[in-house]
Image (cartoon, grey):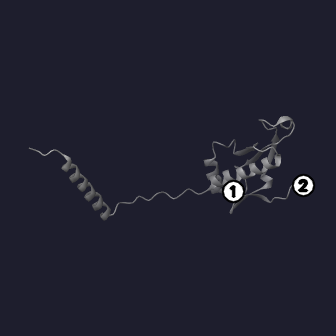
Amino acid sequence: MPAPHRPGLRVSSGLTIPESELSWRFSRSSGPGGQGVNTADSRAELVWDAARSAALSPVQRERLLERLSGRLVDGVLTIAASEHRAQLRNRDAARARLAAVVAEAIRPPSASRRPTTPSRGAKERRLTAKKRRTDVKQLRRRPAD
């Protein structure tokens, strides 16, 4: 059965990785599975050269290379999937994982926190509460002779 035509891996609304930039490697999965595990190449590795990708803008490429520096080998990102017994399901899992990793890496940084100061009323309420607490504790002391 031929695989359905896919125009590319949609990462976000502004980024789609073309199929021509993705390459696959298949190998035998580890773990239990009986006789089938010794013969079927069900483990799927999805390889994408992020450093030379034409799909990324310069800003996205810089952000991705910086955030995924620990996972990249010479600018190449490899995602392996072997959790399913069928190769097709592992391929889909690897594609989904690649899309999630890339989407998280190219996400713009969140806005920095703007420091605020307490209002005058908040300061007054805090000080009156402290004064009330002081009075309560003073009443608990022994009377001074």
Q: How far across and down, in percent of the image, does residue 26 sit?
A: 82, 42
Name the quarter where the C terminus is drawn: top left
Task: From this view, report whether residue 53 is shown above or below residue 78.
Answer: below
The one of 22 and 30 positioned closer to us in this rendering = 30
64 sits to left or right of 118: right
Determine which quarter of the picture holds residue 10.
bottom right
Farthest residue to the right: give it: 1
User: Under tag 1, what secondary structure?
Assistant: loop
Q: How far across and down, in percent of the image, does residue 15 sit?
A: 70, 60
How far apart marks 1 and 2 lie (CA) works out to 29 Å
Residue under circle 1? Answer: 56
Q: What amino acid is found at the position of numbered circle 1 in the picture? A: Leu
Task: From this view, report whether residue 81 is shown above or below residue 106.
Answer: above
Determine which quarter of the picture holds residue 37.
top right
Q: How far across and down, in percent of the image, does residue 118 sit?
A: 34, 60
Residue at image x 86%, y 38%? 36
Residue at image x 13%, y 46%? 143
Q: Nearer the viewer, mark 1 or mark 2?
A: 2
**What crowding class fits label 1: few (fewer than 14 Cα within 10 Å), some (14-19), or many (20 or more)?**
some
Residue under circle 2? Answer: 2
